[in-house]
Image (spheres, rainbow, N blue to C red):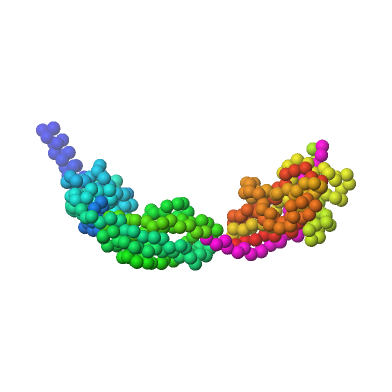
Amino acid sequence: MRNSNFRIGSLIILFTSFTSCTKEDLKWDLDKVVRLPKVITISADNIYNTGAVINSEVTEDGGSDVTQRGVCWSTNQNPSITDSITNNGNGLGDFNSIISGLTANTTYHVRAYAINSKGTAYSNEINFKTTNTSASLPTLTTTNASNITINSASSGGNVTSDGGSTVTQRGICWSTTQNPTLANTSKASGSGMGSFTSAFSGLTSNTSYYLRAYATNSQGTAYGNQISFKTATPSASLVSSKGCTSLNGTNSLYYGMNGTSATWGLSSSGYSGTCWVAPDPNKSGNLGTVVGSNHYVEFTHNFSSQGYIEFWVNTYNPGYNNLIPSITVNGSAIGSATKIGGQTSSFYWMQVRSPLISAGNNKVRIVLSGSYYALKIDEIKIYEY
């Protein structure tokens, strides 16, 4: 009797514990259950000798994000992700899968798939048969680029033969590398045979591009001859000018004989008046003491956009040419300046331009390396695009 009472008591406790769960609790527990997604395959379109387009849709995610979706296909029934597949991104909704590399006149079985944390779900299976036509790829040429600006241009092509199969899409594709394809940037421009022109934008200024026209029929995509063009260079505006009436706003350093060093001074023999000079002519006994490398003048400027600096330089040493300055920005070398005016001989002033300087609050250093009697810099002008 003692054992029986114990069992009855246990059942009462168990029943009481179970009946304390409400409908809301049970519903909450069921909502936490993750299920496989739901996906359907709708149709196969644009079927040709070696490929097709499959239209599918993920209708439910099963309570967990769909991390990958696509289609799988095989010549056998019930294809899975261990067969050939496409990867069409993630999430819910419609998606189109382009499958290629098929064999002509062959039946293929296709299912869409969707993957979440629960696993992989498959759709209904459809099948289609690739064509076995004698058609070939289209034939076309590419038109030279025109209306070229800093960020746009126009081009196009002429489809001279459709290859015996209707051209369903034509257009242009371009890249900064040779032989662009539809895997690069492209723009469609109708269908059928004949000439077409397309304007396009989003380019980078002062940049070389390669472009080809393309045309697609049931056999695939053909490309025209490759052309190249270069976008225009934008004109820059003068935003600031640093005269040499004082040393305010600049840091400088030069190295002298016997391990000495000093800041640059001012000279009245500049290109258009006063200039920065090393060594300082106001200090006696310094003439001919600029030796070694990495003599510099440095300043900070907040470039609101990409730009460059121009300035005049004279590195005096009879019988030698002016030194070509190098430029560093925020401590990193960006290249050497380029001569744009004046004369090369150290008896005269030479005008130079820096490489492009990125936007930002930049510390710009003009560096001169060499042992000369005197180094002079004048009229630093700052340009921005």
Q: Is residue 231 visible?
A: yes
Magenta run includes residue 341? no
* Left or right: 108 as drawn, with respect to 209: left
Instruction: Give coordinates of residue 268: x percent, y percent.
Output: 84, 57
Residue at the outermost front position? 160
Please report the residue visible at 80 percent of the width from the left and 46 percent of the height from the top.
319
Instruction: Give coordinates of residue 157: x percent, y percent.
Output: 39, 63
Nearest the eye: 331 or 48:
48
Please report the residue visible at 28 percent of the width from the left and 55 percent of the height from the top.
136
Displayed quadrant of residue 292? top right
Nearest the eye: 167 or 233:
167
Span colored in magenta: 231-258
Quadrant, the C terminus: bottom right
Please report the residue visible at 18 percent of the width from the left and 53 percent of the height from the top.
128
Instruction: Give coordinates of residue 305: x percent, y percent.
Output: 59, 60
Magenta run includes residue 254? yes
Instruction: Give coordinates of residue 205: x percent, y percent.
Output: 54, 60
- The answer to whether residue 288 is above or below residue 171 is above
Quadrant, the N terminus: top left
Please report the residue visible at 81 percent of the width from the left and 60 percent of the height from the top.
273
* Left or right: 236 as drawn, with respect to 23: right
